[in-house]
Image: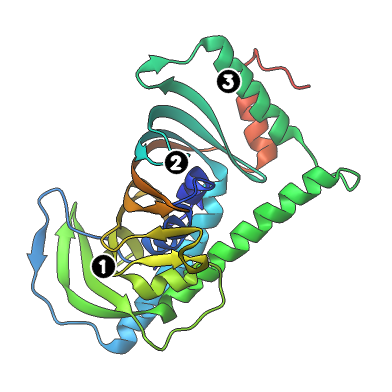
Amino acid sequence: MTMGPNRFVAGNSGRGLPTALILPCLVMISLLPGTAAQDGGSFVPTIPPTPEQLKQLTERTLKNQHHNDRMIQQYRRTERDLLRASGKGLSSKNTLSIVIPTRTGEAKVELERDGKPTDPEVQEQQWRRIARILARKDDPDDPDLKRQYERAEKRRHERAQMVDAVGKAFRFRFEGRDTSSGRTLLITTFEPDPSFHSSIKYANVYKHLHGRVWVDEANAQIVRLTAELMDDVSFAGGLVAKIYRGSNVTLEQTEVEPGVWFPSHARFDLAGRVLLFPAVYQEELHDSEFRRLGLPEEALLKILQEHPAVIRE
């Protein structure tokens, strides 16, 4: 039960304060059963699942999350990113972009920033850059490309490890069932399991998280999740960064095609400090218009067909 560019991870990496919290929360979010019913959902009195049934549902959900993480590498999406941040090295923005997966992460074509449309020529330059990235092949004589592939594979491996760790890191308690848009959602709360220990990067954050999650019981997919820090979390003994108690994350997922679910909305509300400087980080991501492009070679052909002005160099 973990979130996870990978999707949201890729979109938020490298921003100092939130990175260490966002990764485990995203993993949590994309793996745990969802949160709060919507669209006029109604509570459904029901017999709680047995421990074995809950264990099996968790295993199915984790397996499906691995599948979602692989599939998202083949889909483009439109993303609204509203960021309000204050602190050293942090700034606010409001952007609308098309996000394209690449072999080593994601690339964006920015359509709008702070209410102003991006110049069409600048957009074409961005499409050309993406085409060049997608056209790059494995080259044993290119050490920079090799390092990029190795870093990308390392990120995917770390995320997969954190997804698997969720089933061991938390204790889940059945709360009930709900309905939303014709789906039956199983609701659980989660809290850290004191016996959990891990050497996985950032997994120590799990020890400080609790929350609630809603899962589509029939499909074993997360619909929504909320997670909150129960106490302050320090990194490098507090010398590098500290994230304060009460910082929280909310994530919602949607089915984009049968058996494939991606995050459609995420909200991060974090407070803490970077080095000696206080920082506040509030971000909302809205993702829509998911469209399958396929593997990089297929994606490149479709981009060239849709953007004939793009010339491969």
The quadrant in which residue 42 appears is: bottom left
Q: Which mark is residue 155?
A: none
Identify the amino acid type marked 1.
Gly
Identify the amino acid type marked 3.
Glu
| Residue 156 visible in the shown view | yes
| Image side of residue 72 versus residue 102, left or right | left
Q: Nearer the viewer, residue 27 or 301?
A: 27
Q: Nearer the viewer, residue 284 or 301?
A: 284
Alpha-carbon distance for marks 3 and 1? 43 Å
For disc 1, the neighbor class at 10 Å (few under 14, some 14 to 19, many from 20) is: many
Q: Image point 51% across, 35% down: which residue?
A: 99
Residue 27 spot, x, y in % from top left: 44, 62
Residue 146 spot, x, y in % from top left: 80, 49
Element type at marker 1? Answer: strand
- The residue at which mark 3 appears reads as 306
Alpha-carbon distance for marks 3 and 2? 41 Å
Position of residue 7 relative to residue 113, above or below, is below
Is there CB contact under 8 Å for labels 3 and 2?
Answer: no
